[in-house]
Image (spheres, coloured by chain):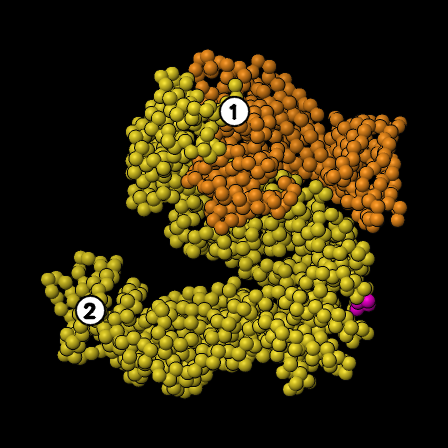
Chain colours: A orange, B yellow
Amino acid sequence: MIHSLFLINCSGDIFLEKHWKSVVSQSVCDYFFEAQEKAIDVENVPPVISTPHHYLISIYRDKIFFVSVIQTEVPPLFVIEFLHRVADTFQDYFGECSETAIKDNVVIVYELLEEMLDNGFPLATESNILKELIKPPTILRSVVNSITGSSNVGDTLPTGQLSNIPWRRAGVKYTNNEAYFDVIEEIDAIIDKSGSTVFAEIQGVIDSCIKLSGMPDLSLSFMNPRLLDDVSFHPCIRFKRWESERVLSFIPPDGNFRLISYRVSSQNLVAIPVYVKHMISFKENTSSGRFDVTIGPKQNMGKTVEGVVMTVHMPKAVLNMNLTATQGSYTFDPVTKVLTWDVGKITPQKLPNLKGIVNLQSGAPKPEENPSLNIQFKIQQLAISGEWGILHEIGAGRTSWCRK
Amino acid sequence: MTDSKYFTTTKKGEIFELKAELNSDKKEKKKEAVKKVIASMTVGKDVSALFPDVVNCMQTDNLELKKLVYLYLMNYAKSQPDMAIMAVNTFVKDCEDPNPLIRALAVRTMGCIRVDKITEYLCEPLRKCLKDEDPYVRKTAAVCVAKLHDINAQLVEDQGFLDTLKDLISDSNPMVVANAVAALSEIAESHPSSNLLDLNPQSINKLLTALNECTEWGQIFILDCLANYMPKDDREAQSICERVTPRLSHANSAVVLSAVKVLMKFMEMLSKDLDYYGTLLKKLAPPLVTLLSAEPELQYVALRNINLIVQKRPEILKHEMKVFFVKYNDPIYVKLEKLDIMIRLASQANIAQVLAELKEYATEVDVDFVRKAVRAIGRCAIKVEQSAERCVSTLLDLIQTKVNYVVQEAIVVIKDIFRKYPNKYESVIATLCENLDSLDEPEARAAMIWIVGEYAERIDNADELLESFLEGFHDESTQVQLQLLTAIVKLFLKKPTETQELVQQVLSLATQDSDNPDLRDRGYIYWRLLSTDPVAAKEVVLAEKPLISEETDLIEPTLLDELICYIGTLASVYHKPPSAFVEGSRGVVHKSLPPRTGSSESAESPDTAPSGGPAADQPSVIPTQGDLLGDLLNLDLGPPVSGPPMATSTVQMGAVDLLGDSLMGDESEGLRSDVGGSPAMGGSGGSFTPAPSTTAPTNVGAPLGSGLGDLFDLTGGVGTLSGSYVAPKTVWLPAMKAKGLEISGTFSRQVGSISMDLVLTNKALQVMSDFAIQFNRNSFGLAPAAPLQVHAPLAPNQSVEISLPLNTVGSVMKMEPLNNLQVAVKNNIDVFYFSTLYPLHILFVEDGKMERQMFLATWKDMPNENETQFQIKDCSLNADAVSSKLQGSNIFTIAKRNVEGQDMLYQSLKLTNGIWVLAELRIQPSNPSFTLSLKCRAPEVSQYIYQAYETILKN
C-alpha cells in the first residue's frame, strides 16, 4: 500500500514528506527528478516510475507534484485516485491547493494525512467526516482557540464513519433549507480543416450544493434519461433504482459534492454552437504569411456565446505576428509561439475577426504543419445534450430549485 | 496566524528554545512548541533530540496535543527505542479509554511504532481491540494486525491474530470486512504459499454483500480479492458478475477498473452463446471510455489496461475508435498510448479515418510522437491489407516533407511493408534512394541498405550506393555493418561480374579489421559459403523469406492471459508479470484465467475474426530464428544417441556440446535483439561459433569425491517386482521461458527401469516438431536410453505425454546439488535448457538387501563420522507400514528390534552406482517424529537419501 508521500514544488524542492510505514529516504525522489528532467515539460512526467526498490506514482496538480512511494503491487489507479483526493481535500480546507497554503497550515495538513491513511490503507477520505475530526481553519476559530485554548481537533467519533451512509453526518441543521444543482456540460470536439466534425462528445457533471437539515432523501428524474447511458455516480446514489426506474435517488452529503458525471457520445450530439472561418497560409520564400480568422455562432437557441478565447500553437518558424482584432485583444508569446485571442461575447450582427501578417524567420523553410485552433467558449443556461432535471424531495417537503 | 511561523528560527539555537517551551507550564505554549517540532519534522529536519521532552507531553486530555505527540512518536520511536518504552503505559491506558476514538487512535499509533520492545506490549491491547464492541475500533485493529505482521510475522502467527482476522471477514459491519480483507491481502502477499484468503461460496457471498455497503477504498480491496476466487461453474461466475456490474458506474476509477478485472476474468468461464455474455460485453465499453475523460495520470493507467483488454477481447471497443484520437493538449505519455490502441483497433471499416488522423499526427511538433505516428502508418499497412496502397502513398507524401526524422522513420516502415507485400510497391524505391544522404540513424541506414541489397537487380547503381556506405564501414554501428555485409553478398550473388571487388573488400573488412565477433563470424560463413559452393550460397542468402505479420507486436497469449488477471495493477502498467519486477516475489503465484466450462465455444465468434483477434487466426509469425540457420544449427543436434544401453560413456558427447553451446549464448543474445532485417540474419548469433570441444571424460572416477569412487559398477540385478513412489508432475520449463513450449514431468522407477515421464504442451501460435532431448553429465550418469519419440508435430494448445526410458551409463560429473539434472530440449524453434532435481529413490536398485551379518559388519566397519542423523517429522505410520512402504521403493528392512517401547528398523539400500547405504530408523509409538541414522561410505549422499525417505513416507 502507500508507503510515503512527498510534496514537491515546480523548482524541485521537497517541501513536505509523510511516511505511513517506515521512513523512506528523500533520495528516492532523485529518480523522480531524473524523469522530470527528461520530460522537459512538467506535464509530461510519466505517472508511474519504477526505481530499484520502490515505485513512484505521481500526479501533478496546481503546480505541485504529489509523489507517493509504494513498495508492493498496488493498483496504481487506487494511488492516483487517492492523491487526487488528498489534493481535493487541501483545496476544500484551505481554499486553494498551493505550496503557501500547505506551508501555512502544515500541522493541519499533517493531521489530515494521518487521518486519511493508516498503514497505507485509506481511512477517512470523505470531507464531511474529516471536517468533524479536524475542523478547517477559519480566522474566527483561530481567534477563539487562542482565547479559550480549545483545539481544532474534534474529540468524538464522527457519526458518519460507521453508518451505511458514511458521507453524511448526523444532526445537520439549517434555517434556510436549500439545494442547488449546477449542470455543467463541456463539449469536446475535434473539427477538421473543412469544418466537419471528426470527433465530439459531451462530458457533463451535476455539481450539487445541498444545505438541508436532518436526513433528506432526494430523488431526481430526467426528461430524457435514455441519453445518459454512461454515468459515474457518487456513492450515495442508489444504483438499483436507477437501473429499474431511471431515477436518481439518494441521501446527499452535506455541502458541495459532485452528484454524477456523464458522457454523451457523438451519436446523440446536436451541432457545435460556433463555427470558425479561417485562412492561414505561408508564402514560399517571402518569410511571411497571412492569418485571417472569423468566429461566428451557429444555431444557438437564442443564447449568447460568451467568454470566447482562442489559442493557437503557431509553427516554430513564426517570429511574430502583426494582427488587428475587430473585437477583444490578442497576445502572441514569441517564446512558446502561442497566440491567444480573448474575444469575449459574440454578437451575431458583428462577427469578431482577427487578421494580419505572420512574420517568419528569414531563410526558414515554409512550415508544413497546420496550426490547430483551440477555441473555448461558454453558453449559460443551455444544455447541449438537452437534459433537464426535475427535483422531488421526499421526507421534509422543502423548497428546492434548479439552477443551470 | 499561519503555521509558517513555526518555520522561523532564532539565532539562539532552535532545539534549545523548543526544549524550554516544551517544558513550559502553560498548556498553550506546550502545544505551540509541539506544533513547531512537527513542522520541522515535515521538512525532514532532525528533531529527535527532543524525544523525552515531547513524550512528556503525552499524558494530556487535549486530543489535539495527544495526536501531535503520537505523530512525533511514530517518526522517531525507531531511533530512540529505549525512550519509546516510556510511552507504552500511556498507550495501554488509552486502549481502555471509554472514548472509541482514543482507543482506536492508541492501537493505531502503537502499530506504527516499529520497535520490537513495544510490539510485545501491543499484543494484549490489540487482542481486545479486535473484539471491541465498537466497529471503528475493530476496523482500526484489523489494519494493525497487518502492521504488526510487517514488523514481526512470527509473533502474529503465534498469537493467533490471523485467525481472528479471518473471523472478521464475517463481521456485521462492511467497513470492518473491507479492512480485514485488505489486511489479509497484504499479509498474503508476503506469504504466497499460505492459504490465508480461503474463499468459498459462503465467504464470497459475504464479500459481495459488504461490497455494496462499504467505502470506495473498501470496494477496491474486496474486488481485488474476488478476482482471486475461482468459481466452480459458469453459473456461479455469472451470478458474481451480475453483482459486480453495478460497480462499473462508480465515480472512483480504481473501483471501475477492479470491477473490470473481475468481469474480464470470470467472463472467460461464460459461454459465448449466452445472452448474458453479450450484455456484459456491451456494459464493459462505456466505463472504459469514461476513464479516458479523467485526469491524464488516470488516463495513462487506464490506457495501458485497455491495451490489454483490446488484445484479449477486441469486440468490446471496436466501435469506439474515435475516443482514442489524441487531443492536442494530452501529455505525451497519453498520446503514445492512444496511438498504440488506435493501431490495435484499426480495421477495414475505420482505416480511412485512422489514416487521416495519423497523417495529421505526423506533422506534429513532438519528435517521439511523430516517429510513432509514422511507424503506426506502416503497421496499419501490414495489418489491413486493403489499406496498404493508401498507407504507402501517405508515407511517400511524408517523405516529400524532407523532415529528417520523418523520412528516416518512413524508410524503416517501408522496409517492413516490402517484407509483407513483396514485389508490389517497388516503384517507390527511386524516391527512397533520393533521400539516401539524409539518413543518419543506424536503424534507417540499415533499413535502406537492406532495401538496396534486396532489390539490387532493379537498382542500376546499387553497387555505387553500397560502396558509398562502405567508405565509413568502421564508424557504422554493428547493425549497419551486418546489414551492409549481407546486402553486398546479395548484390554479388545477383550481379557477380561487376561486384567481385566490392565483395572482397567487405569480407576482408568484416573478417580482418573488425573485432566484433558476430560480424567476423558472419563474414567467415559467407566467405566459406561463397568459396566452396556458390549455388548453396545463393540458396542460403537469397532464400525465400517468410512474410511478416502484425501479430509480431502482440503480447504472447500465455502472458496476455496472465496479465488479464492483473488488470489495474502495476503489472498491467508494465505489461510484465509481477514475478518479473516485484521485489522479493520469489514465491509469487502465477495467476491464470479460469478454464471455460461450456463446450460449444471452441470457435471464436465470426465477428471477431476480421479484427484480428489473437486467437482467431493462425498468422505466419516469423520464427525468431531464421529457418535457414535453424537448419544449420542442427549440426550437432541430431536426436540423442540411441545406442545400446550398455554403451560406453563417450556416446554422450552430443549432450555436452549442446550444453557447452549454451554458455556461448551470452554474446549471441545481444546480437539477436538488434537484428531487424532479413531472416537470413535472424539467427546468426553464436550458433556459428564452434562448439567447445569437450573431450569425453574417459577417466570418470578420478575427479570425484572419495565415496563416489566406485561409480559405474553396473547394477544389472533385477530384484522383486516393485513400483516405487512417483511424485506428481511439476512444471520444469514454463512456456514463457521457452517460446511457448511447456514441459512438466516426473521420474519413476518400475521393475528395475527408470523413466522420465514428460508432458510437452505447445502454448505458442505455431506448430512444433523435431523434438530431441539430451542430458548434461550428472552425478549418477543418468542418460536417455532411447531418443525422444514425439510422433506427430505438436499443434498449438496440444500436449503430448511421453515416457522416456533412462539408464545410468552416461558420463558422470558431480553436480551441486547432487541430484541436479540439466536437460536440453530442442524443437524446430530453438534449444531450451532447464534443470530439475530427481528424487534419489529412483536410483535404489532391487538387489539392495544386505545379509544380516554383512550389515552388522559393515555398520561397525564404517567410521562414526560417516553417520548422519535426521528427523522425519509428522509421520503417523507404524513400523510395519513403514517397512512395507519403503520396500516398495527398494529400501529393505533387514532386522527389527524393540527397545524400551521404540521400534528400531535396520535397513539397507544400494544405489545404481553400487554405493551401499545403511540405515537405522527409530520409531516411537507416541511420537510422530522418526529418527533416521544413515551410514554410508559416501556421506554426501546421506542428505538426499533422507529426502527420499521423507518423500516416500509422506506420500
Q: Chain of mark 2?
A: B
Q: Quadrant of residue B606?
A: bottom right
Q: Chain of mark 1?
A: B
> Taking the image as drawn, is residue B6 in sight?
yes
Residue at image coords 65%, 50%: B337
The kind of residue on which mark 1 rests is: Ser
Residue at image coords 44%, 66%: B732
Query: Where is residue A288 shown, x and y percent of the image?
Result: 87, 43
Residue density around tag 2, few if under 14, some if 14–19, many if 20 or more, within 10 Å: few
Relative to A35, is A151 above or below? Answer: above
Decide: marks 1, 2 in contact (CB < 8 A)? no
> Taking the image as drawn, is residue A269 in sight?
no
- B430 sits to left or right of A81: right
Q: Which residue is mark 2?
A: B865
Q: Which residue is mark 1?
A: B4
For the residues labelled 1 and 2, the Cα–Cα distance comes to: 74 Å
Residue density around tag 1, few if under 14, some if 14–19, many if 20 or more, within 10 Å: some
Residue at image coords 43%, 52%: B584
- B290 sits to left or right of A160: right
The residue closer to the viewer here, B540 or B470, is: B470
**SS state under label 2:** helix
**Span highlighted in magenta in the image:** B426-430
Query: Where is residue A8 shown, x and y percent of the image?
Result: 55, 36
Relative to B95, is B210 above or below? Answer: below
